[in-house]
C-alpha cells in the first residue's frame, strides 16, 4: 500500500576535493558563482564553500559573498509534486472503490488520508453518509491544480505561492553564493599553511620555512565570558588575607565550626557564669551535645585556674563544671582556634624545650544568637591575629595594628581602654575612615591574660598580643554600605558580583 507525505529519495551530493576545486580555478581563472558550479559538477554546495574557505585561509584566493533569495518545495511539497495533492489522492481513492470509510482511506493513503478528506470535503468533491460514515464522490472528475502549481513553482504568481506556503508545501530560501578569485600568492603555495607552531617544528627547525596562516583579529566572534566572580565580601577577605601573609603571619586551620565550650570559653579564662555563655547569646548543639577527647591534663589545669587561680592570680573562685565545659556549640569567635594553636605551641615547647615565636591569623565564620538588624547578623566573619613571643607589650601591639590598618587604608588610630575576660590590658581600636570622613570603631585588641596561657604550659615570660575585627563591618565601610545585610544575607543582590568594578586595598599615607 502507498504511504503519502514522504519525500522521494534524493541521491547524495558529491563532496569536492581541494585539488578538484583548484583545477576548476586554474581552468576558468575564477569561480564566478559557487552555486552554479556546484549544480554543474553535482557537488554539495556547503562542502564546496568549506574548500573555498580552506583555500582562503591559505591566502591563495579571496571570495566575495552575495545573497540569493529563492524558493523550494518542502518535504511534504516534494511528495505532493510527485504523487498529487492529498485531496486529489483521496478523491481518486474513493472513486476507485465506489465509496470508502475513513479507515479504508487511511489503509490505502496513510497520514495523507486525514488531510485529504478535509480538503476534499471543503472543495465539495466528496460527501459523507451520516448513517454509514461512508464517503462518496460528488463530481465526476477533478483537476490537481496544487500538483500543477508545485511543478511550475518558478513562474507561479504571488497569490498562489502564498497559498502553497500557508499549506507548508513551499518555503523561501536564502543561499549565499561566492565569487572566488586568485590572489598574488596563488601559484607560490606549495606547502600547506598551518595555524600553530608545533614542538616538532621547533626541534627540527622547520618552522623557519613553514608558511603560517594569518591571524584574523577583525572577525573574532564568540560568547561573552560567563565565568564566576568573587563575592564582594570575599574580595575584601582575599585582600586582607594577602596583607596578613605579606606581614609574615601564618594562616590557622579554621574548618571546625562546631566547638566545645571548653575551647570556646573555658580555655580563654572566661567564667562559666559569664552572660556570653547563655543560650540567648550562643547556639548550643543538641546532637551531639557533649564533646569528647578533651586533653585531660590540660582540662584539670584549666579547672584549677578557674577555681583557685595560681602564680599570682586568685582565679574566679567558683565550682567549675566539666559538664558545662563539654557542651557543644557553634563557635562564637575564632579565638577558640587561637587557643588551640597556642596549646599546640605549648606542647611543642614541652617536647623540645625550645620556644619558637609565631604569628598567626584566621578569617572565618562565627555564630551568635543575635537580633538581626543593619549592624548585626547571626553568622558573620571574624578576622583575628596574634603574635606569641617573649616580653611583648602594648607598644608592640600598637605598632602591628598601625601597620595593618595603614595597609587597608585607615589612618589616625586611637585606642580606648576596654574590658575582655581573656585580655588584660584590653583596648578598643578606632581610626579615621577616608570614605566616611570620620573616626569609627574598628575592632578589639589586648594582651592574653597569664591565666589563659600558663595552664597551656607556655614559658612564663612569653606573652601573646592579639586583635580582631569584623569582616562584614570592615567591608561595608569600604563599599560605603549602610547595612551589612546588603553584603551577607538574602538581601544581597548576587547579580552585583558581575557588575561591580575591580577593587583592591590601597595603603594609606601616614
Image: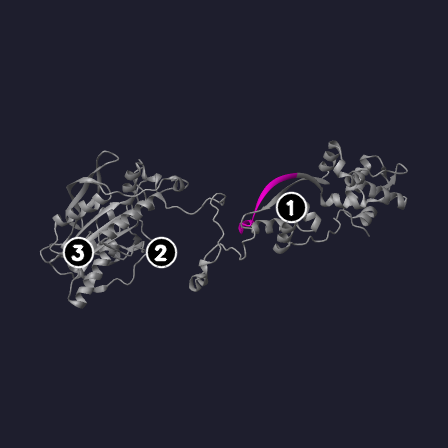
SS label for mark 3: strand
Is label 2 or label 3 in front?
3
Residue 306 in view of the camera: no
Residue segment shown in magenta? 56-68
What residue is pinned by disc 1? 34
Q: Position of residue 360 (x, y in %)?
A: 23, 55
Is 58 inside the magenta-drawn segment? Answer: yes
The answer to whether 193 is drawn above or below residue 62 in the figure is below
In the visual, does 245 lie left or right of 141?
left
What residue is pinned by disc 2? 287
In the visual, does 389 lie left or right of 55?
left
What residue is pinned by disc 3? 388
Determine the image quadrant of residue 504: top left
> In the image, what residue occupies the spot 27% across and 47% down?
240
Quadrant of the image containing the C terminus:
top left
Distance CA(mark 3)–CA(mark 1) = 81 Å
Q: Nearer the viewer, residue 175 or 242?
A: 175
SS label for mark 1: helix
In the visual, does 179 lie left or right of 463?
right
Distance CA(mark 1)–CA(mark 2) = 77 Å
Q: Position of residue 446 (x, y in %)?
A: 16, 48
Q: Nearer the viewer, residue 122 or 422?
A: 122
Is label 3 or label 1 in front?
1
First along the sequence among labels 2 and 3: 2
SS label for mark 2: loop
Residue 193 in view of the camera: yes
Q: Which of 209 and 145 is in front in this view?
A: 209
Amino acid at each position: 500500500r502507498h504511504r503519502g507525505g514522504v519525500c522521494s529519495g534524493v541521491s547524495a551530493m558529491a563532496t569536492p576535493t581541494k585539488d578538484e576545486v583548484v583545477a576548476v580555478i586554474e581552468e576558468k581563472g575564477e569561480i564566478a558563482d559557487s552555486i552554479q558550479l556546484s549544480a554543474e559538477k553535482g557537488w554539495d554546495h556547503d562542502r564546496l564553500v568549506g574548500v573555498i574557505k580552506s583555500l582562503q585561509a591559505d591566502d591563495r584566493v579571496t571570495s566575495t559573498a552575495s545573497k540569493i533569495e529563492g524558493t523550494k518545495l518542502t518535504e511534504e511539497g516534494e511528495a505532493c509534486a510527485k504523487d498529487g495533492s492529498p485531496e486529489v489522492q483521496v478523491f481518486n481513492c474513493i472513486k476507485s472503490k465506489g465509496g470508502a470509510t475513513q479507515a479504508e482511506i487511511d489503509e490505502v493513503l496513510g497520514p495523507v488520508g486525514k488531510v485529504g478528506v478535509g480538503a476534499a470535503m471543503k472543495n465539495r468533491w466528496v460527501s459523507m453518509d451520516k448513517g454509514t460514515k461512508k464517503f462518496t464522490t460528488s463530481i465526476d472528475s477533478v483537476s490537481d491544480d496544487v500538483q500543477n502549481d508545485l511543478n511550475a513553482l518558478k513562474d507561479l504568481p504571488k497569490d498562489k505561492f502564498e497559498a502553497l506556503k500557508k499549506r507548508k508545501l513551499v518555503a523561501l530560501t536564502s543561499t549565499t553564493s561566492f565569487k572566488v578569485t586568485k590572489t598574488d600568492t596563488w601559484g607560490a603555495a606549495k606547502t600547506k599553511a598551518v595555524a600553530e607552531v608545533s614542538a616538532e617544528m621547533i626541534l627540527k627547525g622547520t618552522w623557519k620555512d613553514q608558511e603560517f596562516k594569518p591571524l584574523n583579529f577583525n572577525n573574532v566572534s564568540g560568547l561573552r565570558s560567563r565565568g564566576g566572580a568573587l563575592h564582594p565580601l570575599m574580595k575584601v577577605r582575599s585582600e586582607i588575607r594577602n596583607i596578613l601573609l605579606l606581614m609574615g603571619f601564618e594562616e590557622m586551620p579554621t574548618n571546625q565550626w562546631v566547638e566545645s565550650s571548653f575551647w570556646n570559653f573555658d580555655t580563654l579564662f572566661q567564667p562559666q557564669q559569664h552572660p556570653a555563655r547563655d543560650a540567648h547569646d550562643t547556639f548550643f548543639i543538641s546532637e551531639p551535645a557533649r564533646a569528647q577527647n578533651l586533653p585531660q591534663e590540660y582540662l584539670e589545669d584549666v579547672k584549677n585556674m578557674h577555681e583557685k587561680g595560681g602564680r599570682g592570680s586568685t582565679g574566679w573562685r567558683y565550682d567549675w563544671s566539666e559538664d558545662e565545659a563539654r557542651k557543644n556549640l557553634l563557635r562564637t569567635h575564632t579565638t577558640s582556634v587561637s587557643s588551640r594553636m597556642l596549646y599546640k605551641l605549648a606542647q611543642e615547647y614541652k617536647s623540645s624545650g625550645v620556644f619558637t615565636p609565631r604569628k598567626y591569623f584566621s578569617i572565618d565564620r562565627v555564630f551568635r544568637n543575635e537580633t538581626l538588624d543593619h549592624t548585626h547578623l547571626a553568622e558573620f566573619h571574624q578576622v583575628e591575629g596574634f603574635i606569641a613571643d617573649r616580653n611583648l607589650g602594648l607598644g608592640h601591639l600598637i605598632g602591628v595594628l598601625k601597620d595593618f590598618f595603614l595597609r587597608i587604608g585607615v589612618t589616625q588610630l586611637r585606642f580606648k581602654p576596654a574590658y575582655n575576660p581573656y585580655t588584660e590590658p584590653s583596648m578598643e581600636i578606632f581610626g579615621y575612615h577616608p570614605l566616611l570622613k570620620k573616626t569609627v570603631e574598628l575592632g578589639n585588641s589586648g594582651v592574653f591574660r597569664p591565666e589563659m596561657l600558663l595552664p597551656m604550659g607556655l614559658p612564663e615570660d612569653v606573652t601573646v598580643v592579639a586583635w580582631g575585627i569584623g569582616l562584614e563591618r570592615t567591608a561595608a565601610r569600604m563599599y560605603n554600605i549602610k547595612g551589612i545585610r546588603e553584603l551577607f544575607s538574602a538581601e544581597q543582590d548576587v547579580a552585583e558580583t558581575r557588575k561591580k568594578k575591580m577593587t583592591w586595598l590601597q595603603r594609606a599615607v601616614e
